[in-house]
Image (cartoon, rainbow, N blue to C red):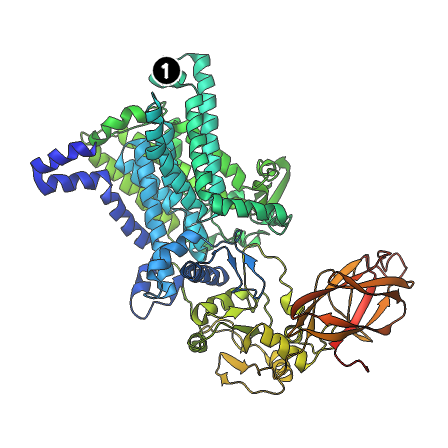
């Protein structure tokens, strides 16, 4: 109903009439219903808002949970400081890290902005989880109602999508995947845009672009702000709709059926619908270009984004997983122990269809000949003509089939066994540009459940339509509530696991200390002492850290390249290729503003974990800091203050072109390939000599040494001896020393010196900068 018609009606009937209009227009009842259903399916999450439980969040994937808590904090920091949120040096300091392929879920960070400083991060996290479930249900309700024309069918279809096994499983800690709420809104507005009345003038096209196309582009942009996987799925759905329009047009022309839908299809052709899809995507590209352009640029320039060769296989859905209850099922999930024997049975996602949804979908396809089984409510009758032009049940069934096959991944797996002789469609998809960076085929279950929800809505209409009753509302209500109850029993995730997310209290005290500086946390980061935990601690202390955890990881060599940090990272007291001591170590600490070294004794506070022996890193800390005692210590950590450097000296750091350090009888050394660099950091302009020991692999060969663009040495390197080059005029700040092997490289295996195939030239050790000319 047009808004101009509502004003007189509201004046005539008063506030009650106006309120009832708004209630039905915005489906407020459906929104409230999904608030209750979300509380039920996520129970006891709502109890986390009570005093004393505010540090609890749902899920068992602690690493991903802590990473997503950091995401919320970092977006607030970046926006508040007018920084690009997709680049940071707060983790993996001092190297700027790109977050374009990190699961930053920028939308959730922006959603959290008004609450930062007012509520705890864990409370905000819980609010976002609840918001995502409510809005996913509400959006799916609007979509299925638009297609099926009945609120009870819409309720069933929305429950199939919003509370699917997949969506519930994302509560384990995957906040970016929980937030699938914008997908049904995108599909709804895309259908409304494509199947709007034809254009008769430029004004019609302009009005359509503003009222129909722009909302489509905006919702697709919101999907971009959540997750790139979901963006690809949305674009794939738009492509499938375009393909359906073309196939339907050809079919109608061949059959020349006299029905209304065929006439409309033939009258409009495929040009205008396709143009509308293209226009929606074009507006989206303009909106998202500030994010999309640098993301694609990084894709072209980097290789770390492409997943490992077996990543897609290990993250594919097993065929049986679609038909057996999820692991979180509280009634009989533990009875299905076969999954424990699957090679990839630890997959994070669930893809269970629910037999209720399958039964309703099958009823849609095979219990009626109608392409669009409608049971239109009286208030919705005006849109019946537009609904008759929408894609029918076979389109949604085809989408379910396509997404189902793609979710199975590159190789079909049945009860843990690979059926390698059967070609799978995903193999074709992973050959396409952009799609080839996908590493989790089982996430295709998300668009699958959305399309299955539409079929379930149709099925509800079919069952209700065959039930003899004089009242459409009563029979639809009983069918819908029965289906919802059965789905709840089939999934039964309640009570969902809630775990504490606690930060050691010293980090809060550190956050009160003025200044922008860094802290180094030990033991060195690994799968146990994970960077995600330290990122979450950062949300309390706000200081830069030298580790981290991003979704598409790549090497961050700073800690193994820089004196002082090297010794604390290796822990074995062997150092690296440098002849370095406390003057160089403290100079490096001062340059990178490292004020504290923190020894963590437990990984997760307030968790019953086995004690860990942290005496090796403690001994290294005390050796590097000259026997200093901690300035703070409790059962969780010990904090050491780094001494101020009395006089800073120049020092060397490992640059490019070096192999990992090795330990031999002459000390710690590194091999270089045909070219390698050392970085020089000098506190002031000065002259210094570069001293090192070097030997050639195999026969003696020449080496060239450049300081910046100036050649400072060229000579022959043979057996291991010491070299002294200089004096070098060091500028204040950073400069580069480059070593070049003009005659190239060889390999130990080619020289009969073992099985090492690496191409090498020289080995270096005991490198240092020295102002004393007499040495």
- Which one is in front, 197 or 642? 642
- Which one is in front, 203 or 109? 203
- Side of 528 where 394 appears, left or right: left
The crowd level at tag 1 (other Cα within 10 Å; few <14, some 14-19, many 20+) is some
Q: Is residue 216 visible?
A: yes
Q: Is residue 459 visible?
A: no
* Residue 375 rendering spot, x and y as whole percentages: 27, 29
- Side of 214 where 576 appears, left or right: right
Q: Which residue is mark 1?
A: 263
- Side of 773 where 415 appears, left or right: left
Residue at 83% across, 70% down = 694
- Side of 247 where 678 appears, left or right: right
In the rendered image, the residue lying farthest to the right is 699
- Which one is in front, 489 or 674? 674
Quadrant of the drawing holding the C terminus: bottom right
Residue at 84% across, 56% down = 744
Quadrant of the drawing holding the N terminus: top left
* Residue 421 rendering spot, x and y as whole percentages: 65, 37
- Which one is in front, 670 or 684? 684
């Amino acid at each position: 109903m047009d808004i101009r018609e509502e004003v007189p009606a509201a004046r005539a009937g008063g506030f009650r009439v106006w309120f009832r209009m708004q209630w039905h227009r915005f489906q407020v009842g459906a929104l409230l219903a999904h608030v209750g259903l979300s509380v039920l399916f996520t129970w006891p999450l709502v109890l986390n808002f009570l005093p004393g439980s505010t540090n609890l969040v749902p899920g068992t994937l602690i690493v991903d949970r802590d990473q997503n808590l950091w995401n919320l904090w970092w977006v607030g920091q970046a926006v508040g400081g007018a920084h690009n949120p997709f680049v940071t040096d707060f983790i993996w300091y001092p190297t700027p890290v790109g977050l374009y392929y990190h699961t930053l879920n920028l939308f959730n960070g922006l959603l959290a902005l008004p609450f930062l400083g007012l509520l705890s991060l864990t409370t905000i996290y819980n609010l976002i989880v609840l918001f995502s479930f409510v809005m996913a249900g509400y959006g799916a309700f609007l979509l299925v109602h638009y297609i099926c024309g009945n609120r009870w069918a819409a309720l069933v279809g929305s429950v199939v999508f919003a509370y699917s096994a997949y969506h519930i499983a994302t509560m384990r800690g995957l906040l970016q995947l929980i937030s699938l709420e914008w997908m049904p809104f995108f599909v709804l507005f895309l259908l409304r845009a494509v199947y709007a009345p034809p254009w008769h003038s430029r004004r019609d096209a302009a009005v359509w672009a503003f009222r129909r196309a722009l909302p489509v582009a905006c919702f697709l942009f919101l999907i971009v702000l959540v997750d790139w996987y979901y963006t690809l799925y949305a674009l794939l759905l738009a492509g499938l709709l375009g393909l359906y329009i073309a196939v339907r047009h050809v079919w109608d022309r061949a059959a020349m059926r006299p029905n209304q839908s065929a006439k409309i299809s033939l009258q409009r052709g495929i040009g205008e619908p396709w143009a509308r899809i293209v226009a929606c995507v074009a507006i989206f590209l303009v909106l998202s270009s500030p994010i999309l352009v640098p993301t694609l640029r990084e894709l072209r320039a980097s290789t770390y984004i492409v997943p490992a060769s077996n990543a897609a296989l290990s993250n594919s859905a097993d065929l049986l997983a679609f038909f057996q209850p999820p692991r979180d099922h509280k009634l009989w999930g533990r009875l299905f122990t076969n999954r424990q024997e699957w090679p990839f049975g630890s997959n994070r996602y669930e893809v269970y269809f629910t037999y209720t949804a399958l039964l309703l979908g099958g009823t849609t396809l095979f219990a009626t000949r109608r392409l669009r089984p409608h049971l239109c409510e009286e208030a919705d009758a005006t849109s019946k003509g537009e609904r008759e032009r929408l894609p029918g049940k076979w389109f949604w069934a085809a989408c379910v089939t396509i997404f189902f096959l793609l979710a199975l991944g590159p190789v079909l797996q049945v009860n843990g066994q690979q059926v390698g002789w059967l070609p799978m469609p995903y193999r074709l998809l992973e050959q396409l540009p952009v799609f080839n960076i996908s590493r989790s085929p089982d996430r295709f279950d998300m668009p699958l459940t959305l399309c299955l929800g539409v079929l379930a809505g149709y099925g509800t209409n079919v069952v209700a339509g065959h039930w003899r009753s004089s009242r459409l509302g009563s029979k639809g209500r009983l069918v819908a509530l029965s289906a919802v109850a059965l789905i709840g029993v089939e999934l039964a995730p309640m009570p969902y696991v809630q775990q504490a997310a606690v930060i050691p209290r010293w980090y809060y005290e550190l956050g009160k200390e003025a200044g922008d500086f860094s802290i180094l946390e030990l033991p060195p980061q690994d799968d146990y002492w994970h960077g995600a935990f330290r990122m979450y601690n950062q949300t309390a202390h706000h200081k830069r850290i030298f580790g981290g955890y991003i979704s598409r990881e790549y090497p961050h060599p700073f800690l193994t390249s820089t004196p002082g940090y090297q010794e604390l990272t290796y822990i074995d007291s062997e150092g690296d290729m440098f002849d370095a001591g406390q003057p160089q170590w403290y100079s490096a600490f001062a340059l990178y503003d490292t004020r504290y070294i923190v020894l963590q004794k437990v990984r997760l506070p307030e968790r019953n974990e086995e004690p860990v022996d942290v005496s090796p890193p403690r001994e290294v800390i005390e050796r590097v800091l000259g026997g200093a005692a901690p300035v703070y210590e409790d059962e969780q950590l010990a904090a050491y203050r780094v001494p101020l450097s009395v006089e800073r000296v120049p020092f060397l750091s490992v640059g490019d072109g070096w192999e990992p350090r090795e330990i031999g009888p002459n000390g710690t050394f590194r091999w270089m390939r045909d070219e390698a660099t050392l970085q020089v950091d000098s506190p002031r302009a000065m002259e210094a000599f570069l001293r090192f020991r070097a030997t050639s692999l195999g026969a003696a060969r020449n080496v060239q040494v450049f300081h910046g663009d100036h050649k400072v040495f060229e000579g022959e390197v043979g057996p291991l001896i010491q070299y002294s080059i200089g004096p070098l005029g060091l500028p204040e700040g950073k400069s580069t020393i480059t070593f070049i092997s003009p005659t190239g490289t060889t390999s130990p295996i080619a020289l009969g010196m073992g099985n090492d195939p690496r191409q090498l030239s020289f080995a270096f050790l005991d490198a240092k900068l020295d102002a004393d000319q007499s040495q």
